[in-house]
Each structure stands twice: as C-alpha cells, then as structure tokens.
Amino acid sequence: MYKAYFGFREKPFGKTPDPRFLFLSSGHEEALARLEFVLEEREIAVLTGDIGCGKTTLSRALMDRAGSEYRFCYIVNPRLSAIEFLRTTARLLEVEQPAAAKDILLEQINTVVYESYQRGVCPVIVIDEAQMITDAEVFDEIRLLTNFQLDDRNLLGVVIMGQPELRAMLATSRFEPLRQRIALHYHLQPLSLEETMEYLDFRLEVAGGTPGLFTPDAVQKIFDLTGGVPRRINSMATNALLVAYGSDAALIDSAIIDEIKDELMM
C-alpha cells in the first residue's frame, strides 16, 4: 500500500520496540549512557516515563550495545508474588528445575549467577511495567538479588522500568532499603517540538524514505495533539500516511492531520 507509494522499504512508524528506529533525543541519549554505566557497575537502575515514551525500545537498544558479556532476562508481567518472581527469575537464568522452597531456590540462583561470572557473563534482570507490582515483597527480593556479589564486584545488574507512579511507590519509607541500593533514577521526558520533527524525519529515513514529508504546520499539529509522546506520534503519522496515500498527496500538511485527529484522539 503506502510503502511503495512513498518508497519505503518497511513501515516507518511500527509499534514494535525495534532499536533500529530508536531516535536518540537528548533525554534518550542521556538515559542510554547512564544505563550503560550502571550496567558496567552491575548496579540497580530505575527508568520511568509516561506510556509510549520509549522505555522498552531503550532497553532493547541497551541490550544491543551491551555485547555478549551480558545476558538480558526480561520479566514483562510483574504481577507476581515474591516466590513467583524468584521462580521466574530462576527460569530465565536457565535453572532447570526451580525449587519450591525459597532457601533452595536462592541457592540455585546464586549457583547459576556465579557460574555465569566464571564464564565472563553478567546476567541483567529487566523488569518492565514495574508499577504493576502488587506484592511489596517482590521489591525486597529485587534488592536482595544484589547480594549476589564478590568482595570487589556485584554479579548481576537490575533495570526496573515503569510509569511515573513507580517513582511515587518507591518514594515511600517502605522501600528505603531498596532506594539505598539504586544507583540510577532517570525519568524520560516527551519530545520537544524540534525533536518531534527530527523524530519523524529520522524514522522516515530508516524506513528508506526521505525527510520533509511532514510539513512544519503538520508537525506542529502532531506535537500539539500528541504531547511529543513517541507512541502517539507513531499512531498519528501512520494514519496520516494512509490518508495521504488515499488522496495521492505528495506531502502531509496540517489539513491531513485535521482530517484524522478526531478519530485518533478518541
């Protein structure tokens, strides 16, 4: 459909967290650099941001940059009890038969983590949508995972990602012990107007197209309607491409954005 019309090799505004399409705004670039440092130190990092700001894509880019000496283990559904969290972690670390008893389970995890260290590999536990954790003891177990260490180094890293309410959760006195272990707190902000234009052009070029397809007045409307949130921008840009294709338009201007905005904002 519109891919051939505009000369794209692939869809420029897909919904999957493909790190090739990660646009490094100043905020995203700083977040990635800080996460890389925390990874090197085998510490705990907390990354927050509004829905659709690019946290998951950023974590995929981190994984791509990290290299073979890191093993990433993603927990994408954190609505678990403490023991379920540990068993899930054990399975991701390839413990063959995770124990039911907590003390044995922790020993299994410790053994696998130490064996990974001997092979020159650092496990990295990535917990997505952490604001959905309902069992406070899960956060205790996350903290205690960092007890797997030698005299001079930690043996694994932890990246906790979530929406802004995660910051409020962790700010309570209940989680003071965990906060003291966290080496990085970073909050991703939406894109600015200038970054929104750069973001659109960047993704068009990655997909094989040419920049400038969205006129400045269209970019202004997209920014006003989406608040600079990348996922919302993707949705609006995809629909704009479809409308432009259907009307044989060479450029996407504010009139096309006006045509689709009511349906999308619903």
Image (cartoon, grey):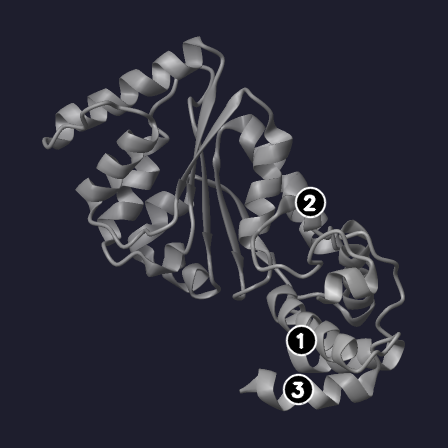
Q: Where does residue 54 sit, x and y in percent of width and height?
A: 59, 56
Q: Which residue is mark 2?
A: 20
Q: Measuring 44% from the left and 23% from the top, which residue is drawn there? A: 154
Q: Residue lying at the far top in this picture: please name it.
A: 118
Q: Where does residue 230 sit, x and y in percent of width and height?
A: 65, 64
Quarter location, residue 25: bottom right
Q: Measuring 35% from the left and 49% from the top, which residue is drawn there? A: 176
**Other residues around mark 3 within 10 Å, as few (<14) / some (14–19) / many (≥20):** some
Vertical placement of 150 versus 57: above or below? above
Q: Which residue is mark 3?
A: 261
Q: Where does residue 7 sit, x and y in percent of width and height?
A: 82, 58
Q: Nearer the viewer, mark 2 or mark 1?
A: 1
Q: Which residue is mark 1?
A: 239
Q: Label 3 is placed on what type of residue?
A: Lys
Do residues under tags 3 and 1 come within 8 Å of each other at their CB atoms? no
Q: Quadrant of the N terminus?
A: bottom right
Say whether disc 3 or disc 2 marks the residue closer to the N-terminus. Answer: 2
Q: Measuring 65% from the left and 77% from the top, which residue is drawn there? A: 226
Relative to residue 130, is residue 52 drawn left or right? right
**Other residues around mark 2 within 10 Å, as few (<14) / some (14–19) / many (≥20):** few
Residue 258's disc number: none
Circle 3 SS class: helix
Q: Where does residue 177 sit, x and y in percent of width and height?
A: 34, 44
Q: Nearer the viewer, mark 3 or mark 1?
A: 1
**Other residues around mark 1 within 10 Å, as few (<14) / some (14–19) / many (≥20):** some
Q: Label 1 is placed on what type of residue?
A: Asn
